[in-house]
Image (cartoon, grey):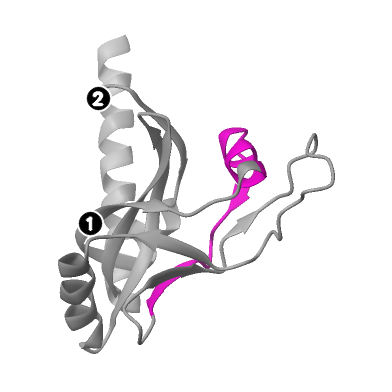
Amino acid sequence: MDGILRIAKNKKAHFHYTVEETVECGIVLEGSEVKSIRSGNISFPDAFAEISPSGEVWLKNFHISPYTYASVFLHEPDRPKKLLLHRAEIKRLQRKTMEKGYTLVPLEFYIKKGKVKLLLGLCKGKKLYDKRADIRERDVSRDLQREFAHRQDG
């Protein structure tokens, strides 16, 4: 990843959802929000994106802690943030999210060429048996790695 600084990754999203496709988008932020994001003071376990009837995409339940060194002009930590996408992408995502079970989930936040970017995933919720299969698969691969490392050591 050339020139990209990863800030945060939503690991639970891959457990709770099947990611169908991803879209990179920008975020409309205030100055103190950018500084707070750069220092890693964000939380987004329940965050999701919503397409408004006017054709704008908004990120909800995304918390940016106030920047400690900001003076009077503090930002509101839980305000909805507008996402920047092309109109054609918004229409395509809107058609997809109309289908049952699809939602827009933030997967990753990073800085690219000095701008804060968001990797937005078009996701479908997993059933309980899918989650169990993922856990089982992860346990088996971990056991194989452990066995392989043990045999390498002698």
Residue at 37%, 65% in the rendered image? 105
Furthest residue toward top: 154
| Residue 52 occupies quadrant | bottom left
Answer yes or no: is residue 112 visible. Answer: yes
Inspect the magenta stretch and tell me whether residue 37 lies in it. yes
Query: x, y (%) of residue 146?
Result: 33, 30
The residue indicated by pointer 2 is 148
Position of the N terminus, as image quadrant, is: top left
Inspect the magenta stretch and tell me whether residue 49 lies in it. yes
For the residue labelled by badge 1, is the local secondary structure a helix, a strand or a loop? strand
For the residue labelled by badge 2, is the local secondary structure a helix, a strand or a loop? helix
Query: Looking at the picture, does residue 43 appear above or below residue 141?
Result: below
N-terminal of the pair, mark 2 or mark 1, is 1
Q: Which residues are magenta?
A: 32-51
Residue at 15%, 68% in the rendered image? 88
Q: Which mark is residue 93?
A: none
The residue indicated by pointer 1 is 22
Position of the C terminus, as image quadrant, is: top left
- Residue type at the position of mark 2: Phe
Query: x, y (%) of residue 35?
Result: 62, 36
Answer yes or no: is residue 154 visible. Answer: no
Query: Looking at the picture, does residue 53 appear above or below residue 38?
Result: below
Pick the front one: 53 or 12: 53
Residue at 34%, 58% in the rendered image? 14
